Image (cartoon, rainbow, N blue to C red):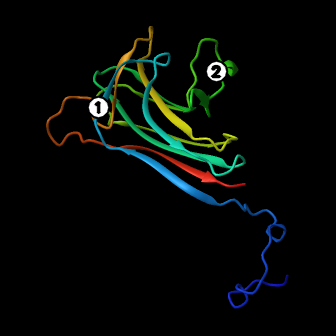
Amino acid sequence: MGTLTVDNLNTSAITATSLTGVATGKVVQVIQNFDDQYATYSNTSVDAQATVLSQAITPTAATSKILIQVNLCVSCTTDGNKHFGLIMYRGSTEIGSGDASSWNSGVGSTHSATEQVNYSQPDKILTGCFLDSPNTTAATTYNIKSFIHDFGSSISAKNLVVNGGGYSYNNKETAITSSSITLMEITA
């Protein structure tokens, strides 16, 4: 093929075999659900997750992959030691989480997690990124679930706040945040 330069770029034949080691997939569609509304979800825990974001996509080919990117801003309405989790689902199937059986019995599984130890900490940001293979051309819904619970000697369900400081400030000490899920279809 020779050397590829700017001068001969338009006349050179580029094939998949001449691009050894380079990905040849294309992003064919991008869909986003952006949420900027303050919301609360009652009595959440690892066993009682709240669906906080959802987005459907219809792949153009069964061989396509879906890249899921999530940014979720969470907080709570009480002080103390808290554990937040983010879980991804394709429909009702959990995807991209840790393998709970690889550690202690009885632990939950999440895609990502963080903790809060008191009110002095700002809202928490849970992020997620996962490349899924749904193997379908049917509309597929991705659900993002989250939870919060106390940790320590006992676990108890708590109210999860999404997109805002959990403490009842009425001034500039807190702000409304935003969350989003972005789905990108990548062809094979």
Q: Quadrant of the C terminus?
A: bottom right
Residue 17: percent from left, percent from top: 84, 67
Give the secondary structure at mark 2: helix
For residue 46, say whether it is visible. Answer: yes
Residue corresponding to mark 2:
100
Q: What residue sits 47% from the left and 29% below the top? A: 145
Q: What residue sits 79% from the left and 80% below the top? A: 13
Pointer 1 with pointer 2, Cβ within 8 A: no
Residue 33's mark? none
Neighbour tally class for label 1: few under 14, some 14-19, many 20 plus, Cα within 10 Å: few
Q: Check the image and report above or below for 146 versus 8.
A: above
| Quarter of image, res 95 | top right
Q: Amino acid at mark 1?
A: Ser
Q: What residue sits 66% from the left and 47% below the top? A: 65
Q: Check the image and report above or below for 183 versus 169.
A: below
Neighbour tally class for label 2: few under 14, some 14-19, many 20 plus, Cα within 10 Å: few
Q: Amino acid at mark 2?
A: Ala
Q: Quadrant of the N terminus?
A: bottom right
Closer to us: mark 1 or mark 2?
A: 2
Residue projecting furthest to the left: 170
Q: Is residue 116 left or right of residue 2?
A: left
Residue 97: percent from left, percent from top: 60, 30
For residue 84, say whether it is visible. Answer: no
Mark 1 and mark 2: Cα distance apart in space: 31 Å
Residue corresponding to mark 1:
120
Query: Which tag, 1 or 2, sits closer to the chain's start?
Result: 2
Q: What residue sits 31% from the left and 27% below the top? A: 40
